[in-house]
Amino acid sequence: MIEEAELAEPRAEAGIVVEDVTRSFGEVWAVRGMSLVVPYGRVTALVGPNGAGKTTLMLMLATLLAPTAGRIRIAGVDPAADPVAVRRVTGWMPDTLGMYDQLKVHEYLAFFADAHRLSKAERAQAVPALLATVRLDEFALAPVHVLSRGQKQRLALARALIHKPRVLLLDEPASGLDPRSRIELRDLLRRLAADGVAILVSSHILSELAEMADRAVFVSAGQVVASREMSDLAAIGSDQRVPWRIRARDPEALEAVLTGRGLAGTASPAGFELPPMTEDQASDLLAEAVGAGVRILAFGPTGTPLESAYLALTEEGRR
Ligand SMILES: Nc1ncnc2c1ncn2[C@@H]1O[C@H](COP(=O)(O)OP(=O)(O)OP(=O)(O)O)[C@@H](O)[C@H]1O
């Protein structure tokens, strides 16, 4: 099922169009009728719990796995019918990295530049430029195997970009990155999107996706369960149950109110972490605490709007 808002997208113009795609492994239905659109010039986040089918979908988009049924178009091309044409326009950063460990870092990128048939002049320009972009220039002459996990991940990102793809697929790109590298990844993806690249990024690190992405597609148990503009996400959740945090000048008085309501709040330096509640339940609690004379310093839902939406929209999040 494609949501109404997505039908409004100019689909023929989109970098990725997925229509009712299914993939099974024997008895296991990893992807069950997914539909989504990834437009050019935007970062689309693929969000969902473990086993939701994100990697299976990414592998199909990257021409590495055939769908059991359904229709995929990458830059207008069917990956099953013409994988070479799709790979020419697609950058793919997998979640597990296959590395040619004995190659030097610059040779590794040059190898992929050749595989994508860049000219010598293009290769001579692209390799050092990308090494600088991912801050690996000082490792250019080092063998790949000396790189740390996060450095290897940055190299894999450079590899995905070597042929200036119009469509970029990133599976958990931030998982091994330190905070500075994550900020750089976010800035790089925003720049690429501004240049018109269609970007699909899957991650569990929701706080980062919130800053990185324009739109989130929520998947659960092999299906798309919702698709939302990041800017609209703040509106979701007013009647959804999300965790809250409360802090009072007199924590003991607050604890007495919480206990009276059967709320087992966990104390943290920032206050009490409360179990998921709706806004109505939260405002009732606040009124009661204030009515009981507790002097409240801070009270609000915890996490980002994306995290709240994730909890509300993916089944596993509710458990
Ligand atoms: N080659 C395979 N053979 C059998 N089952 C598979 C295979 N690949 C994936 N699956 C199953 O398909 C489902 C979806 O897996 P997938 O790796 O796509 O999930 P995911 O959303 O990427 O999860 P995670 O967030 O943990 O990476 C899981 O139940 C998984 O066990």
Image: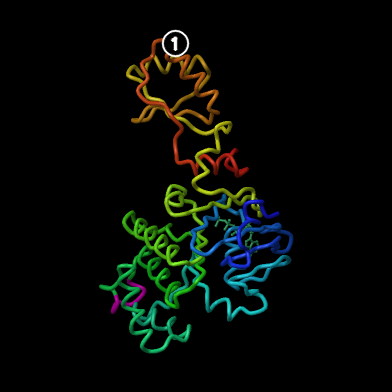
Residue 139 vs residue 43: left or right?
A: left
- Which quarter of the image is occupied by the C terminus? top right
**Where 241 sits versus 139, above or below?**
above
Q: Position of residue 35 (x, y in %)?
A: 66, 58
User: Between 74 and 151, which is closer to the camera in this rendering?
Assistant: 74
Q: Residue at x 34, y 80 (%)?
A: 106
User: Quadrant of residue 160 in the image?
Assistant: bottom left
User: Between 29 and 228, which is closer to the camera in this rendering?
Assistant: 228
Residue 208 vs residue 263: left or right?
A: left
- Which quarter of the image is occupied by the N terminus? bottom right
Q: Position of residue 314 (x, y in %)?
A: 60, 44
| Residue 267 shown in magenta | no
- Mark 1, residue position: 291
Q: Give the residues drawn in magenta, as a range.
A: 140-146
User: Quadrant of residue 156 in the image?
Assistant: bottom left
Q: Secondary structure at mark 1?
A: helix
Residue found at the very far top of the displayed protein: 292
Dot 1 crowding, Cα within 10 Å, few <14, some 14–19, many 20+: few
Going by the numbered disc 1, the residue's amino acid type is Gly
